[in-house]
Amino acid sequence: MTSDGLKKKIILQCLFVILFCSTTPSFGMGTEQLTEQDKRVYQLITQCHTEVVKQLKLLLSSGQLSIGQLFDTFYIPIPNTSPQKYHTQYDTTTDEVLRPILDKYLDKDPQLVFVIAVDRNGYLPTHNTCYAQPITGNPQIDIIKNRTKRIFNDRTGLSAAKNQQSYLLQRYSRDTGEQMVDLSVPITINNRHWGAIRIGYKAK
């Protein structure tokens, strides 16, 4: 094979890698047909997203948080927690400011399981009140009642956290066999991707 022929072969191989090996997994890029239920949840999540982004921007403009604090990813382990929980420079503030918003939207539809805001690594600083109950020391109770301040970096959680498309829809089965849907929209603050709003709900 000539030198030119070898170069062409290498270029074609590189193009194949770029086009096919870098393809985003098909389990969720928001391109599948939305059901009527999905559309209702999408309306809720866009409203919730607007309120959350507004509050985060107010925290910055009022000086309650700096941009560095809001984008803090130095997760400080909370002792004696399993699964491990973490504090950041902003989680106490979002507990006060964001939880009322998240709870309000959770109450809008009995099919909803959770309404949360996670950072781009899947860190959940503030959960709904029903999942932020005091730690009892009983793992079987705490794993259900206290799910806040954890890093949810499973495939579904991390895909939602890192997605920057207009929305991401993921359908999956819980280990109980229950069919679940996770709908998320990205949060961008000052042209920087912070994370996402996620709503989990039971599929009808």
Image: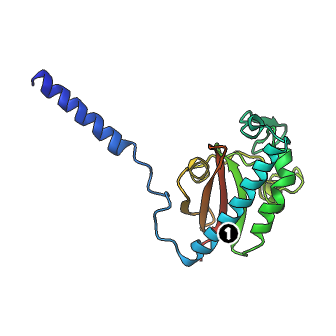
Structure colour scheme: rainbow
Badge 1 element? helix
Closer to us: 202 or 193: 193
Amino acid identity at mark 1? Leu
In what quadrant of the picture does the N terminus appear? top left
Closer to us: 194 or 143: 194
Q: Position of residue 46 (x, y in %)?
A: 65, 64
Q: Position of residue 106 (x, y in %)?
A: 75, 68
Work out whether residue 138 can be spotted: no
Marks counted in the figure total 1
- Corner quadrant of residue 75: top right
Would residue 47 appear left or right of 2 to someone viewing this image? right
* Mark 1 neighbour density, 10 Å: few (under 14) some (14–19) many (20 or more): some
Residue 46 versus residue 125 in the image, above or below:
below
Q: Residue at x 63, y 46 (%)?
A: 153
- Corner quadrant of residue 171: bottom right
Residue 3 versus residue 29 in the image, above or below:
above
According to the image, label 1 marks what residue?
44
Q: Residue at x 71, y 63 (%)?
A: 48
In what quadrant of the picture does the C terminus appear? bottom right
Q: Residue at x 71, y 67 (%)?
A: 113
Q: Position of residue 100 (x, y in %)?
A: 84, 61
Would residue 48 appear left or right of 98 to someone viewing this image? left
Furthest residue toward top? 3
Work out whether residue 17 can be spotted: yes
Residue 134 versus residue 200 in the image, above or below:
above
Closer to us: 151 or 17: 17
Q: Position of residue 127 (x, y in %)?
A: 78, 55
Would residue 64 appear left or right of 41 to someone viewing this image? right
